[in-house]
Amino acid sequence: MFQFLQLFFTGLTIGSSYALAALGFSIIYNASGVINFAQGEFIMLGGMIAAFLSLAGVPLPVAVIAAVVLVGLVGLLVEKLAIEPAGKTDATGIVIVTIGVSMILRGLVEVTLDKKNHALPAFSGTTPISVLGATILPQSLWVMATTAVVVIALAVFFGRTRWGKGMLATAHNRIAAQLVGIDTKRVLLASFGLSAALGATGGILLAPIATTSYDVGIMLGLKGVVAATLGGLGSGVGAVAGGVLLGLVEAFTAGYVSSAYKDAVPFVLVLVILVVRPRGLFGLGPATRV
Amino acid sequence: MTSLSFPNLLEPRSPMRFVPLAILVAVLATLPFVLPNVWYFDVAIRIAANITVVIALNLLIGHCGQISLGHAGFFGLGAYGSAILTSLYAWPPMLALAATAIVVGLLAWLVAVAILRLQGHYLAMATLGLGIIVSIVLTNESAFTGGPDGMSVPDFAVFGLRIAGEKAWYWVFAGLVVAAVVFATNIVESPAGRALRALHGSEIAARVVGIDTASFKTRVFALSAVVAAVMGSLSAHYMGFITPGVAGFSKSVELVTMVVVGGLASVWGSVFGAALLTLLPDVLAHLEGWETLAFGMILVATMIFLPRGIVPSLVAFFTKKEG
Amino acid sequence: MLVVENLTKTFGGVTAVSDVSFTVEKGTTHAVIGPNGAGKTTLFNLITGVYTPTLGSIRLEGVEIGGIAPEKLARRGVSRTFQNLQVSMNLSALENVMTGAHLELNSSLVAAMVRWPGIAAKDRALRARAAELLDFVGCGRYAGADARSMPYGALKRLEIARALAADPKILFLDEPAAGLNHTETHEIEGLIAELGRRGITVVLVEHDMKLVMSVSTRIVVLDYGKKLAEGTPEEIRTNRDVIAAYLGAETEGA
């Protein structure tokens, strides 16, 4: 029971960060139908920039906020400089562009920052808190709480605000959205900024627990895509559920089966779900029309 | 109405179409006499191995329009299949290669049946997952694979004839490149090749005229996987030592990059793309760490400025068409 | 030739086609008309294997074909064109037409790899036939062109040439005149009439009434997924229900 609870906390913590990554994927997918394989690099950038700023003596809260804002800007740049100019190629083409972007971002960090591992100081100490015999790091609480706040904020944004509704409308039917006066180009741009900032948030929250380096984005990004696919591409609820589910399954596999194979779990899961239910747990089926 | 202001060397059925092939053969036959040392032979062999894999992968990505982000997994399975069977079970290398290729072909065929009804992003996801699972298994089953440290592979021998050393292997790989170019060109120019491109253009229209799109995609996927596996086997014997890196996600991405940069649905594009991007890390060797950045830049720039890839764009530039 | 009985298709509670029955005689031109959303294209998609019927039967020459995939139906002589163009833009005009005859050719990958004798010769013969077909539909001048460089009207005809290359027993044309101007529509009308004269069984969905009335042997009228009327062009022209449905649709649409 004790081990179960311990693994549950671990899974929930990692799962929360996967959920943030998956939300980033879903937002861009909704705005453009693009799976952004560079999402993982936004996560990495968040952690790395915050770590370097903090290392340079910038106070932690400032470093964190600056990193989120900077990565958000990077997201806007990516859309302006790569996605938009690539124009309307097919899904395969866009997958390739975003893979290229991810290599550029990773390469830039490799060249300008460094290839070492970095840790960010924990936000509020490292004294474990004991809960029902299991322990939990204060940073884990930060991860879960921030994710919860972000999820609620996004729900309000998409449900209540003009901009959010416009983005949803674009996802639903781009041409109809254009007809009612929504600037779908700006929606796409905004979706990249927002997703990048979300990714960075996840990366920063996770950096004090697992160290960060220039190449962590690959695995984190892939797991984010897997979480989004599990939950159903484009579904917000699905992204959060997929992320948390993935985190939990991973933690329990590591604890009860084999820690060596925990990284394989998401990919086995995604294969199974694609074969059994390609639209994911909460996604809508793809519509074909001839 | 087409008027060629320039003889189109690559147009199917043009009498000039054998020119590029003749040039390739001539270059491959001359190289051994001009390459100064074994280091260059090694580069040439690596280029040849990549060209062969990429030509087959391009049939899948360029012709069928089906992306695979896990092809290095098949290459890795081929490499480790041969390595394990020959070193741990003392199988003859040729038998090990054939058995591995058949198993990989069957695996790919099974997977294809399950996932090729998926499209675009979903297919990318599924192949990606498959490739990563392979690389994780290779890393973790250290009893068989030596784990992350890798394992050594015995020399290749067929009918008592040992193949060892860069200069001997060069001829094997050069021969395979020529075979791959010839076979792929034959497919592309055949009714089957036209069917592949047709299903990429419009899947439903292809089905309506009787093209069994699912079967074509499955067969091409399996074919490209088998080619990757065979090249994996041979590369393993050539290198004599392999690590799980050969099956990694970044290797899969590299292969896709070669296809795209050279030119989708272009056999000569694959030759060019694989050669260019295999050379790149060696050219950038003094700029340690810049490879990822350079690869990314080339990939994105190609997609933006030459979305059809370098070779088809050049061909189009020299072939003016009036509609 | 083609017998459709009690055909019904529902999409998650919405009934797109409801209890439709009609018979197409060999060598005739049959039109399916009706207001937008009447279920015409769904009906086509059911008969040509894109959708599986919820209920009812479709028999071609006495054999049940409901729910059989399009690529298998092609073997039984069913061919079609599409309302929204489905041309492979990465192929030339000629190659698009040649794909129509896919089933006559050896499509084995291994045979292709080794240039199995006969493949190339047969393909060359087909190339000549495809050029003739392009000529027949009035696209002769585009024989060497890439599909992507062709105008919309020519692509609509290209689809017909591709369908004819399959030598179909029955040919389905889904809105062959959609998006065409007056002259082009007139030319398509002539082409369909010519198909009829050559004894090809044609079923078409079309909005252009002048075209429908001039080329059809019989007309089926759909409204809200149900068959509203069936008869000769003359009978349909004077049918009260049909007039009401069309006038009703026009008032709603206005």
Image (cartoon, coloured by chain):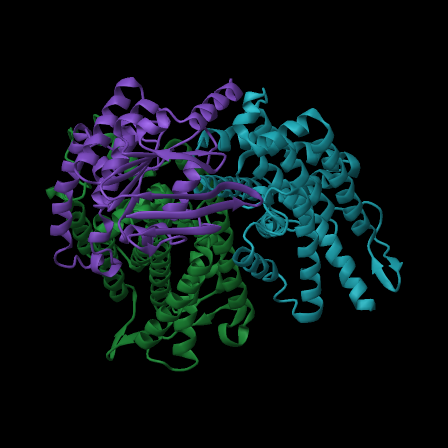
Chain colours: A cyan, B green, C purple
**Towards the viewer: B112 or B206:** B206
Q: Residue at x 16, y 51 (%)?
A: B26
Q: Is residue A229 at least partly visible in the picture?
A: yes
Q: Position of residue C158 (x, y in %)?
A: 25, 34
Q: Is residue C77 left or right of residue C53?
A: left
Q: Nearer the viewer, residue A177 or B23?
A: A177
- Front in this rendered view, residue A228 or A67: A228
Residue at 28% x, 32% y: name it: C216
- Residue extending farthest to the bottom is B90
Left or right of B201 on screen, residue A37:
right
Say which residue appears at 66% left-offset and 67% top-offset.
Answer: A259
Q: Is residue C98 left or right of residue A218?
A: left
Side (left or right) of B84 relative to A241: left
Q: Which of the two residues, B200 or B177, is positioned nearer the viewer here?
A: B200
Answer above or below: position of B290 versus C147. below
Give the quarter of the image for residue C132: top left
Q: x and y percent of residue B69 in the render?
A: 46, 52
Q: State the image quarter where residue A61 is shown.
A: top right
**Position of A21 relative to C193 (above/below):** below
Residue at image coords 57%, 45%: C12
Indicate the position of residue B186 as horizontal and vertical percent values.
21, 53
Q: Position of residue A277 (x, y in %)?
A: 56, 55
